[in-house]
Every structure is written in C-alpha cells, then in structure tokens.
Amino acid sequence: MKKMSLLKRAQLLQSISLVCVILMIVSLVRISAVLPGVSKEADQKKKAARNASYEKEYVRGSILDRNGNVLAFSDKAGGTRTYTAPRSFAGVIGYWSKIYGTYGLEDTFNDELVHSSSLTENKRGTDISLTLDLDLQKKAYKAIRKMEASLVVLDVKTGQILALASSPSYDAGRLEEDWDIINATEGALLANAYKNPVVPGSVFKLVTSTEILEAGIEDEEVDDQGSYKVNGQTIRNYNGKAYGRISFEDAFIKSSNVYFMDRAVKLGGESLEATAKRFLLGQDIPLDFTMLRSSFSLGSGEDNVLASTAFGQGETMLTPLHMAMITQSVANDGEMLEPYMILKKTNGKGKDTYTGQTRLLGRTMSEMIAYRLKDVMTKAGEAYELSLIGEKEYRIAAKTGTAQRGDGTNNAWMVSFAPADDPRYVVVACRLKTDKIGKSMAPVIEELYSWLLRQ
C-alpha cells in the first residue's frame, strides 16, 4: 500500500508539473503581445503611436540632394510636405500624406525623419542627404517624361547613384487632389528604374560575352543564316537578318542572336548559370534604400530556353539599376560596387550620424576580360555613331538591346559608360512598350553625358 501511495504521489506531481508548463506557455503567449521584439504587430502599433506623437511635436526632417539643395521639407510640426521638382523625384522620394501615409524614401526612413537620434530643443527630425544631383535628375526626367521609361546614372568608381529617373510620374505635392488620376495611371507608383524588372534583350549579352571570353572561344566562327533551330523551335535574329560567318567581336557589334545562342548551347547551361550568379542575377540585393530584385531561370535545362536566355529573352527579368550595376562592373575592371543613395544622415543637433561609403559586392570577371569587353563596347559605340562628347571629344562605349515583350511592343535599351578610355560614369536608358529599337535611346544618352562631362 505504501508503494502504491508513492506511485500515486509521483503521478500527481507529474500532472501538477504539466499544468504549470501549460500555464507558463499561455503566459508567454500573452506577454508576447505586449513585449517589444516579441510581437511584430505590437511593435508596429507601438511605433506608429510613437511616430504620431512625434509628428505633432517635431518638424519632419528634410531630404536633400548631394549639394545641399532641399528636395522635400516641412515648415512646422504636422504641417504639409513641400517638394522641389516633385515629378522628377517622385519615383525615389515618394510622398508623405496625412490621408495616404508614406511611400518611397519618405516611408523607408520615416522613423528617422519624424524624430532624431538626439531629440533637441529645436524639435527637428533627421535630415537625409542623397547622392542624387538635383539638376541632373531634372534633366534625366525631362528627357524621358513623354515616355514610359527610366534613366540611371552611376559613378563608376564609387557606386554613388547620381540620377534615378522614372516615367510616368506624379506631383507628390498634389497627392490628395490627384490621387484618383495617379492611381489610374499605369506605372506611376511603380518606379521603372529600380522596382519594375523587365526583359533585357541584347544588353544581357554583356553576361553571355563574359562566359564566351572566359571559355576562350571568341575566335571561333559561327555561320549565321539569320535563324537558329533548337529543340524543334526556330529562333531568329532581330528582323531575321543573316550575318554569314561571324566571330565574337562582329557578333557583339552587330548583335547577332544566332551567334550568342550557338555559343551558349555549346558551353551548356551550367556555365551560363555560374556566370549569371556572379552578376547577382536571380538574387535579392539589399541596398541602402530598397531591395533590388531580378529573376533568372533556365527552366528544366532545355536548350531552347538556354538559347533564348543567351540574348536576353527567355525567363530573365531585371531592372535598369541592376543593368547599370552589370555595366559598371565592366567599366570598373570587373569589380561590381554596391550602388548607394544615402550620402549622410544629420540629426537635430546638426551632427552627422551616418555617412554612405563605397562597398565592393564582388568580382564579376577578371581585369583582362573587362578590358576585352570595354574595347568591344567602345567599337559598338562607334558603330552606333554615338557623338563624341565635350571639348576633348570623349568616346561613349555602349551596347543596345531591343527586347520583344510578347505583346507586339519592345523594351528599347542602351547601356553605356564614358569616357570610354577612362570610365567615370555609367548611363543606362530603358524605354518600355515601344515600337522603337535600342539605338533610339542614343540622343538621351548623349544629352546626359554632355551635361556630366561639362561639370
């Protein structure tokens, strides 16, 4: 009997322990709803309440360009937001509204704009200074404002984004009045320059060219009769033009799809996939103001998908900013830098709390391969009859692309850097849903370089 009593006592203790554990779990679940860092929903509500309180008391921080020109500012706590050149910058800065909330940089840096890391007597939020240049951004937007298009300008040696223009756009200062019109305008709230991945077409040949040059097969000739048959599918050059026996350099300049398809199939899918990986295709790239996304897939390994991918059709989608990164790595001897837009952050006391800096993302190719690509892009720029720029008559190195969208329209691309012999700037232009070809973007590219190389 004594043994049975001990057994029952043990069972009772086990039951009590189990009940205690359950009660602890229930308590933790309840606590998680209010403890910071435990419940995201609770944290977000707490942050929103705190920011609402700050907005009533503190003047929202300003957003400025690289030269200190004010792009967005508030005169008083809780007051309306004023934007300089709003249509030029809407795709980047976005908006702040009592009715519609925040978007773009106004949203990304909302916590810092509404208050400072050092709350001071002058009751100001953090000021955010950008790498963008007011005059260049206005010029870039003006050049594309009548198109559905985008323009990107990068500093080759630092990775700073000097211009990031998208069209269509909107006037952030008239958000409430124009809200219905803005929402009815396709693409107005989706910045084409960095938020809208699209088919790249032949500008993707920078990637395939890297693979070909690394394999050392650039001197081998391909018989280009205007079309290439693979897996029962016939894929043609743009307009079906035939170039005859052709090797790498002429194929790049004339943009022979047949040549690049033949070479990609010869080298195999694993080779192109490995090369694409170095250019960060198909990967999410965290930048200081956004997450840059692209897609890259060779499907189930079918040769017809590989062939289409080789000249930028297939299932590849990327943004003009990503294409600018690829071009920058060629111009920078194979080193891809992280594009950045935040120059500095300044708290309410006028003290800089953050300064942007150049960061290396990785090497996409050797210096020798970069040299070969820079040379052939310079020759392509000459073949496109791009103007000599500035008093010193600098050459523009370039590659065009005319990507078929599948709806009867094209994406017209031109990627470039200049001066060709000592690159300082990358300029990428992309026009969507057009019947034009890539070379049509030449005047836009030339205009921006004329401004850049005068400064």
Image (cartoon, helix red, strand yellow):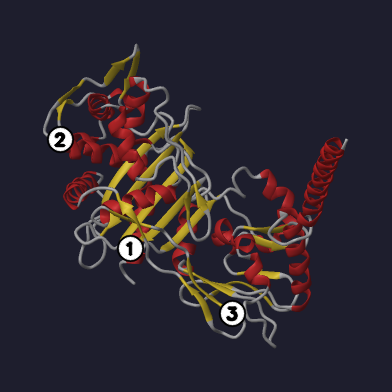
* Label 3 crowd (10 A; few <14 / some 14-19 / many >=20): many
**Quadrant into which the C terminus falls:** bottom left
- The label number, if any, that marks residue 450 in the structure image: 1
Q: Amino acid at mark 3?
A: Asn
Q: Of all residues shown, which one is farthest toward the bottom?
A: 121
Q: Residue at 26% of width from left, 65% of height from top?
A: 390
In this rendering, position of residue 305 left or right of residue 104: left
Q: Earlier in the sequence, mark 3 or mark 2?
A: 2
In this rendering, position of residue 364 left or right of residue 15: left
- Cα–Cα span, label 3 and label 2: 55 Å
Q: Is residue 229 above or below residue 58?
A: above
- Depth check: 113 or 32 in front? 32
Q: Position of residue 93 (x, y in %)?
A: 58, 62
According to the picture, the residue beneath numbered tag 2 turns out to be: 218
Q: Is residue 164 above or below residue 21?
A: below
Q: Position of residue 17 (x, y in %)?
A: 80, 46
**Quadrant into which the N terminus falls:** top right
